[in-house]
Image (cartoon, rainbow, N blue to C red):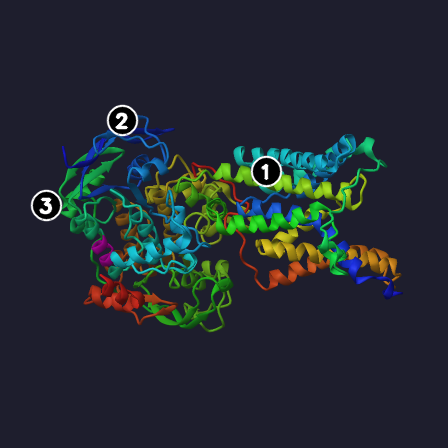
Amino acid sequence: MDDTLLSIQGLTKAYPGVVANDDVSFDIRKGEIHALLGENGAGKSTLVKMIYGLVGPDRGTMTLDGNAFAPPKPSVARQAGVAMVFQHFSLFDALSVAENVALGMENPPKPRDLAARISEVSEQYGLPLDPSREVASLSAGERQRVEIIRCLLQDPRLLIMDEPTSVLTPQEVDILFETLRKLKSEGTSILYISHKLEEIRALCDHASILRHGKNVGTCTPSETSAREMAEMMVGSSFATPKARDVTLGEVVLTVDNLTLPALDGIGTPLRGISFELRKGEVLGIGGVAGNGQDELLMALSGERLSDPGMVHFQGKDVSRQGPGERRLPGLLSAPEERLGHAAAPDMSLTENGVLTAGKRAGLVKNGFIDWAKSRLFAEDVIEKFDVRTPGPNVAARALSGGNLQKYVVGREIVQKPELLVINQPTWGVDAAAAAAIRQALLDLAHGGAAILVISQDLDELMEISDRFGALNEGRLSTPRPVQGLDMEQIGLMMGGAHDMEAAHAAT
Amino acid sequence: MDLSSISPILLVASIMVSATPILFAAIGELVVEKAGVLNLGVEGMMITGAVVGFAVGVNTDSPLVGFVAAAGAGAALSFVFALLTQYLLSNQVATGLGLTLAGLGLSALIGKPYEGVKSPTLPKLDLGPLSDIPALGTMFFRHDIMVYVAVLMVILVWAFLKFTRGGLILRAVGESHDSAHALGYKVVRVRMIAILFGGACAGLGGAYLSLVRVPQWTEGMTAGAGWIALAIVVFASWRPWRILIGAYLFGGVTVLQLNLQAAGAKVPVALLSASPYLITILVLVIISARGAHGAPASLGRSFHASS
């Protein structure tokens, strides 16, 4: 028991209507990387929030280094040596890197000393970062470095990382893993939360698996196959998408030298994007977040209009048409941001259904909404995509991220698009649901629709795409067939390599 | 008209006086908005401060006690706003507008017995040799203490926001309350304090109107100064120094048009009286067209720990 850093015994936390954690126990040893695995809603977030002092447990105890540990607030946890890197970055866009770091510290040194410390630590762990930069100008990978450095400056004994690799390029993942291994060798324990089983197998010493709030077992990932772990997580086996033979039809979408200035001076401009998409084809578009993904989706969906001649759909120039006009003949889209972009948070699922499917699914007649039909439409989506919700009258905001994602993706697929443009289809969705969404996309393509998938999950893109291209600073690399692409080539296509060399040199 | 009747020296001196109420209200509202709260009740808090400051000043025969009471009254009114928006999560825009209406009504009620009463005056400071400098002395160094307190307030707020940890936390709360909460900062508490500060400042600004600038009580005497203060915060792109520029600009136009009226300018009086407001709108339009950024990202959004 001597080498146990944090011991969790019987932690239970109930929210109204749901038991988030039910009698969870496990130990984290000193200097190990311990994985916490589980589906969405399995209670991982609640568990780490209790360790970090953001919520208090109803029952159960924790001991840190043999002493009782029950942090009433994060600052107490931080003082005890627990640090956390959040899934949705807890950074402030308008503040500088140094100010962001100072906010996460109990007793920050003077600004000048702090800047020096940041440079020192970032060099030591191979995470280059300029303390005076404004966070708004940083890439997702760099933002994560800010969080990590903020934690490292406090010499943590336990570092909690919540889904750290979901926004990183393969090269950035390598750098992160280097850093984590280095920390481990120095005796820091890491609690690593992820969906990505291969990563856990590559990195972690032990893994605890949560299902419906219960710890269903601890295993040694290097000796357990990804499939076994996935089945422990889900509690049953699930289908992986099947390979298929592609029959390409006529060209559905032609994008010719699509160029758009950045919106309001922030964001990324699109620079001379050209490609074609045929019936039955899935084009995967990768790239580090913030390189024009949202902008490309908006230009194709019709949210932003481009100059005439840039976007042709089914042979017609739709560059000057808005989203409604494009939707009617079957150019549908599903943006990344679920709450606020894909769905109106405070409106019901039925109402949200009408918002995109109103005309194409015939829910609106002569300007009046057919509510009975709309309800049936929403129920249809809920049933086909296994959306877990009490009913279609529930507000979109009330659904968990994964469930809402299933709804907004399903809503478009049920409308039988000719072309579906979709950004991050499985972001934050658990493994089983992600597999179901991917399968639905493949089935859609098999039925003759063209699909453009924008995603930061390369495994996903490799799995479902026929061709792959990458966005870098608003430019699209020439799409290439997925067969025969290796990670090295993909990394080069993503071109986010500008500060990678420096990182490698520093390590 | 006779422009020579306008003395530049006296003009500058009166600009400093006429800008002071707006300066107080605007610097207070800046802090509130930096914390991510949009309080549209500035006008209501100002006029409440004006009447309470006047009443207490008259009854105690001490303008300074009046100012303290006015700050308290402004803060008390803003406390209602803080409770409603921070704990009961009411809509900030609607609550702020309601606060303005309530303040206007309340002040008329309290002020009824004081109409036509003369207030005790705040003495002009004698800054010794500084006050004796020709021209400059009259322009800048022969004012009452509150003129300098207002300027000092701007400097203090600037230094607080830029150099102190408290200021950093306040800005962080206004920038992203979810992130600030995740790091363990008390979002609601920070905002409560900021709102109370903003209320106290608005109260001081109102009292300056009724105790020094006019100096007597008339119903509705703030005449939109609270709204101008709100506009100046936007004009200033949420930066303290520019609040100073904005307040003096508005104060300048106000005084200038009065002087022009006195000098008999051949412009309709109604247009001259409206000019400070028209110019405020014009400046705001120009600034917005240039795409002024810098608004705190969480401005006007309600925060609840569960979401």
Can you name the residue that lies furthest to the top here? Answer: A59
B90 versus A138 height, above or below: above
Residues at marks 2 and 3, common chain?
Answer: yes
Tell me which segment is drawn in magenta: A173-179
B295 versus B93 height, above or below: below
Q: Is residue A134 left or right of residue B219?
A: left
Say which of marks 2 and 1 sits in front.
1
| Residue type for callout 3 | Glu
Quarter of the image where one finds residue B222: top right
Quarter of the image where one finds residue A49: top left
Q: Is residue A175 magenta?
A: yes
Can you name the residue that lies furthest to the front here? Answer: B129
**For the residue carrying disc 2, how many other residues have a C-alpha within 10 Å: few (<14), some (14-19), or many (20+)?**
some
Secondary structure state at the residue bearing disc 1: helix
Q: Which mark is residue A275?
A: none
Q: Which residue is mark 2?
A: A60
**For the residue carrying disc 1, how many other residues have a C-alpha within 10 Å: few (<14), some (14-19), or many (20+)?**
many
Mark 3–mark 1 Cα distance, whole angstroms, equals 60 Å
Q: Which residue is mark 3?
A: A223
Q: Quadrant of the N terminus of chain A?
A: top left
Dominant SS of magenta comes to helix
Residue A185 x/y as whole percent: 17, 49
Q: Which residue is mark 1?
A: B196
Secondary structure state at the residue bearing disc 2: strand
Q: Residue at x 43, y 65 (%)?
A: A268
Q: Residue at x 81, y 55 (%)?
A: B273
Q: Is residue B293 left or right of residue A149?
A: right
Say which of marks 3 and 1 sits in front.
1
Q: Residue at x 36, y 55 (%)?
A: A143
**For the residue carrying disc 3, how many other residues have a C-alpha within 10 Å: few (<14), some (14-19), or many (20+)?**
few
Residue B249 x/y as whole percent: 70, 58
Say which of marks 2 and 3 sits in front.
2
